[in-house]
Image (tube, rainbow, N blue to C red):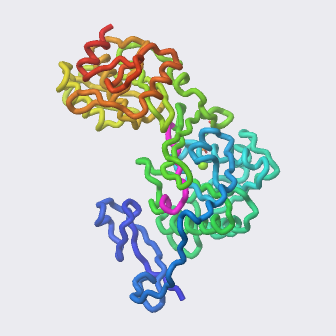
Amino acid sequence: MVKHKNEFVCSNCNASFSKWSGRCENCGEWNTLEENFAAVEENGNKSLASRSRISGKALEYSGIKDILPSDDKARLATGFKDLDTVLGGGILQGSVSLLTGQPGIGKSTLLMQICAEISRGRRVLYVSGEESAGQVKMRAERLGADSDELFFAASTSANDIAKTIESGEFSLVIVDSIQTLSLAEIASAPGTVSQVNNCGNLLIRAAKSSDTAVVIVGHVTKDGNLAGPKVLEHLVDVVLNFEGDRYGGFKTVRAQKNRFGSTAEVAIFEMDSMGLKEVQNPSAALLAERQNTDGSIILATLEGTRPILVEIQALVSPTNFGYPKRTASGFDLNRLNLLIAVLERRTKLKLDDKDIFINVVGGMRLNDSAADLAVCMAIASAAAGRKLSEEYVVFGEIGLGGEIRSVFRPDQRVAEAKKLGFTNAIGPRTVKDSFVLKVKDLRDALIRYVNE
Ligand code: TYD
Ligand code: MG
């Protein structure tokens, strides 16, 4: 017989304690300890693993050469080409994926569109614990999800949902969202560590035993963490992050973890009144409204393995009083401060009495060290009131000595710039292509090119 013993788990760092306290002793966060029920054997052993005698039997193993590859099971195409690539070829049968994102970003919309596609030929169930049947119907109608094979249920009981998944009647089950589910056995409120953890486990077991693909929605907190425990991310096969501006701009779906594919790919979406659409040519869309003013630089960046041209804007204005202000949207603020320090030290620019604002156009979030040179050139261009020729794109990493360093996949960046009609790129000396105007260091780049 199994009894329950309480422990308290920190929802921030996952450390466990035997007693509750207001502050986690491990990570120092306040109010993050939540009760968790761990199964304990009746004889008081803390867990099976703590038994001293080894009672298992030796494993049967086989040579890796002799193992037959598991047949690449049916992949369910989502109807979005790039999203399929992110998933490694579609949603794998029997896999459990977690789709995370801020409230309102479009998770339910995306999943309803996927349901619409997959239900043209397979049975799909959409379970919502957040919205009523009427609300979901309204969205489904708008998105053209009208297949006879698409079903809906409203439930917050993890047990009932797991039982339904286990029946094997559906190829795909959507659970929206994990934070609304609960198990009657557990006293704590939905969304707490023990609820999310145990409900997640139950759904995963049901999915694996019936070979049903399950997609679970998870909300994230303001700082981008999954609300509830991190452990869920370890349990599932695929973790997809849905990011971007809630209002307008591009939204991206990236795999943070993928047991069946690469995590380097990204799908880019735009929301309109007919739901989400994949953006076919993001560079052209991002550059459509560009005006060549000072402080505007086109960066050739990569989103996953896709090259994208994006405009970086800088605004430099005198500080009115006190401490100069530095703000970045779409770019890491620490990196910006570092680059400003390099600019001041390695060139003659004086920025300590200037407010500096950086904006990456289109709601993109840059995570590419090749953006360094473009950001620095944008700041220098804005500070000096001089423009870079509008025919140029820029890429390159900057070292603390102000030197321009080589970047990942320069050829793809160059190819994208050529495709969109740019005449040259400013980049590191290591790139072979004559399209690239090679610069040694930051001073060199500014003196030669930021001068109109
Ligand atoms: P939703 O998918 O409900 O977000 P989430 O499930 O992540 O919380 O919807 C996000 C927003 O998208 C919502 O505010 C309304 C808007 N929207 C559109 O602009 N067009 C559409 O076709 C739909 C269905 C929603
Ligand atoms: Mg939703």
Q: Which residue appears at 55% of the width and 63% of the height?
A: 65
Q: Residue furthest bottom?
A: 43
Horizontal relation, residue 352 to residue 190: left or right: left
Q: Quadrant of the N terminus?
A: bottom right
Q: Residue furthest right?
A: 148
Q: Position of residue 367 (x, y in %)?
A: 40, 37
Q: Residue furthest top?
A: 452
Q: Which residue appears at 59% of the width and 65% of the height?
A: 67
Q: Position of residue 136 (x, y in %)?
A: 70, 49
Q: Position of residue 161 (x, y in %)?
A: 66, 65
Total marks in image: 0
Q: Position of residue 238 (x, y in %)?
A: 54, 54
Q: Which residue appears at 48% of the width and 61% of the height?
A: 234
Q: Is residue 375 visible?
A: no
Q: Is residue 30 visible?
A: yes
Q: Which residue appears at 49% of the width and 46% of the height?
A: 263
Q: Is residue 419 above or below residue 106?
A: above
Q: Is residue 119 magenta?
A: no
Horizontal relation, residue 433 to residue 447: left or right: right
* Residue range (magenta): 232-245
Q: Quadrant of the C terminus?
A: top left
Q: Quadrant of residue 68?
A: bottom right
Q: Is residue 96 above or below residue 158?
A: above
Q: Is residue 237 magenta?
A: yes
